[in-house]
Image: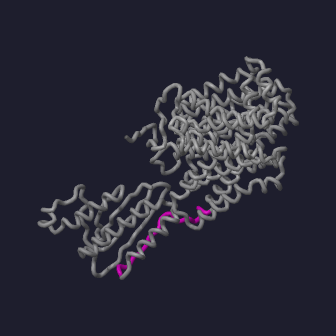
Amino acid sequence: MINVVFNWEWNLQQPEEIKYWVNDKPPLPVAILAAVQQISLLGTIMTLPLVLGRTLGLYIDEQIHLVALTMVAAGIGVILQTLNRNQIGIGLFVPMHTTSAAFPAMAIASQMGGLGLAFGMLSVVGVVQLVVSKIITRLKEVIPVEIAGLAVFIIGIEVGLLGLRNILGIGTELESDSLNAGVGFSTLALIIGLTIWGPPILKAFAVISGLILGQIMAIWFGLVPTEDLMAIGNAELFEIPPIGEFGWKVDWRLIPDFAIVGIALSLNCFGIMTVAQKSYDASWKRPDIEGVKRGLMAEGLTNIATSFINGVSQTSSGPAVGLALTSGIVSRIVAYILGGMFIVLAFFPPVTYLWNSLSTTVVGAILLFVGGIITITGLRILMLRLLDSRRTIAIGLAIIGGVGSGLLARIADEEAFYFALFSTPLSLSLSIAIVLNAFFLINSRKKLTYEVPLVENWHKQLDKMVWELGKSWGASPETVARIIHSLNELTDVVTGHELISENDKKIYISARFYQSFCTVKFFYTGEGFRIVDKPPTPEQMLEDPDSVTDLAGYLVRQIADGIKISTLRNNTTVITLEYYD
C-alpha cells in the first residue's frame, strides 16, 4: 500500500524503508524510545554551550544554566519546525541542534560590551534568517536541484569526518590511543551489525543500542573520567534556570559579523530541509522552496527566542535527520515528544552532566554511521540531473572548497566579519556554488531553435541535440528521454505518412526551459493530424487510413504532460509539447 500526504502546495509519498511515516502514530513506547534515541544524539552536541561558557569565563553554575536554556530553545525549535502553521515550519521531522557558528562573533561582542551584548546580538542571526526566508522563493533559478544535492553531500562528509575525528581523538590526549579508537570502531561495527542483521525492533533502535553498549565499554576501559560520572550524582536534581540571566542588548557595529552567521545558518537550513524532503518522500524530484521558506521562518524565530532567553543559537540538524532515516521513524508525533523532552529535561541538571560524560569515541561512531548515509543521499540527488560544463565546474569547485574549508580558514582573519562563511564546509561550499551558478546564468539562453534536415541519420542528430539541451538545462535524464521519444515519434509520423511538404523536408524545433517546466515546439511545412484521447480499435485501424496517425498522436499524448496541435495560414503545422521535470 502506498501512502500519500497532501499538504498545502506539496505532496509526499512514503518510502518503503520508512516504517512510521510523517502522519503515522507509532505506539507510545516506540515513539518515546525514538525520541530518547534522538535526544541521546543531540545531547552530545548540547555540550557546545559548556565550551562557549568556558570561553566567556562563566562559572560552572552559569554554564549549566546556559545549557538548560539552550535545551529549552531546542525544544521550541523542533516544535515550531513540525507545526507548519501560519507559514511557520516545514511540517516534517527536522530537529535542531546547537551550533558553534556564532562563537567567534559572540566572543568579540563579549569583549566589546559584556555578556548581554553577546547574547543580544544573536537576535540579528534570527532576523537575517527571516529576511532570507522572504527572498528565497525568488532565488529558484540560482538554487537548482544539483545545489541541493551538493548541500546534502557536504553535510554527510562534514558529519562523517567529525565522527572519524572523534574516534581517532584528533587534537586531544587520546590521539594515539588505540584503545579509544578500538572502542569507537567496535561501536560502529555493532551499530552496523544491528542495522543489517538485527531483529526488527533493534534495527529501529540500533543507534541507541550501540550508544549504550559503547558507553559501557568506554567506562569499563577507563575512557570516561571518574569525576564526570560522579558529577551526575552530585548535581541538584531539579532547578529552574534563570531566563535572561546575562542581559540583552545590541550594538549596530556588530551587525555585519552576526549577519554573516545568519546567512551561513540559512544555507545550512536549506541543505538540511533538502535532506529531509528527499529522505521522507519517495516521489521527490526537486527542493520544495516554499517548504524551505517555512523552515527558515521557524529557525529564525527560534534563534530570536534563543537570544532573549540567553541560550546558544540553533540550526537544523543533519545528524538527527539521518538518524530518523536509519531508524525508519519520522513521525511528527516523535518530534512533539522530543521537543517536550528537551524543555522538561532542561529543569534537571543531572541530564547535562550525563551528556557531558558520554565518550567522544562512542559519539564519533554514531556520527560516522549517520554521515555515510547522508553522503550517499547527496550523491543520489546529484545524479538526478544532467550537468553541462558550467554546472560541472560550479559543483566541482564547490565540493573542493567545502572539503578544503579548513585550509582556507587558516589564512582567513578570524576577526573579519566574513569569517563565519569559513566556519563550516557547508556554508563555504554553498556560497561558492550559488555565486558561480548565478554568474554562469549571465547570457545563458533558455530558449533555443534548431533546424533538422530529414536526411540519413537524422535520428542521431536529433538525439544528440536534445541531450545537449538537457545538459544545459540541468534536466533529469528521464525528461530528456521522454522528449526524444516524442520527437522521434512525431518525425516518423510526418515522414512515414508523407504529411511533410516535398519542398521543405526539414523539421524545426523550438525549446524553452524554465526551472522545472519545459516547452518544445515541433514545426514542419505540411498537413497536420489528430491528437486523440483514446487509441483506435483494431477495426478502426483496418477501416480508417487516418487511424495510424491517430495512434501516433495518442502515444505522444501519453509521453508528454501536455500537447496541442495547430496549423498556420502558410501551411505550417505546429505541435506544442509540455513536460514537467
At 87% from the left edge and 32% from the top edge, which residue is drawn?
57
Image vertical order of residue 51 relative to residue 385, above or below: above
Task: Indicate the quadrant containing the C terminus: top left, top right, bottom left or bottom right.
Answer: bottom left
Q: Is residue 441 visible?
A: yes
Image vertical order of residue 197 relative to residue 309, above or below: below
- Quarter where residue 550 is shown: bottom left
Residue 290 placement (x, y as % from top left): 53, 42
* Stretch in magenta: 440-455
- Quarter where residue 87 is shown: top right
Residue situated in front as seen by the camera: 531 or 501: 531
At 32% from the left edge and 68% from the top edge, which residue is drawn?
489
Asked if residue 443 lies in the magenta stretch, the reply is yes
Residue 152 placement (x, y as % from top left): 60, 50
Residue situated in front as seen by the camera: 451 or 94: 94
Image vertical order of residue 50 relative to residue 260, above or below: above
Give the mark count: 0
Residue 101 placement (x, y as % from top left): 74, 42
Residue 252 placement (x, y as % from top left): 79, 38
At 69% from the left edge and 46% from the top edge, which residue is drawn?
185
Residue situated in front as seen by the camera: 523 or 126: 126
Q: Is residue 90 visible?
A: no
Asked if residue 558 lies in the magenta stretch, the reply is no
At 78% from the left edge and 32% from the top edge, which residue is drawn?
119
Structure colour scheme: one colour
Q: Is residue 39 left or right of residue 481?
A: right
- Quarter where residue 145 is shown: bottom right
Task: Indicate the quadrant containing the N terminus: top left, top right, bottom left or bottom right.
Answer: top left
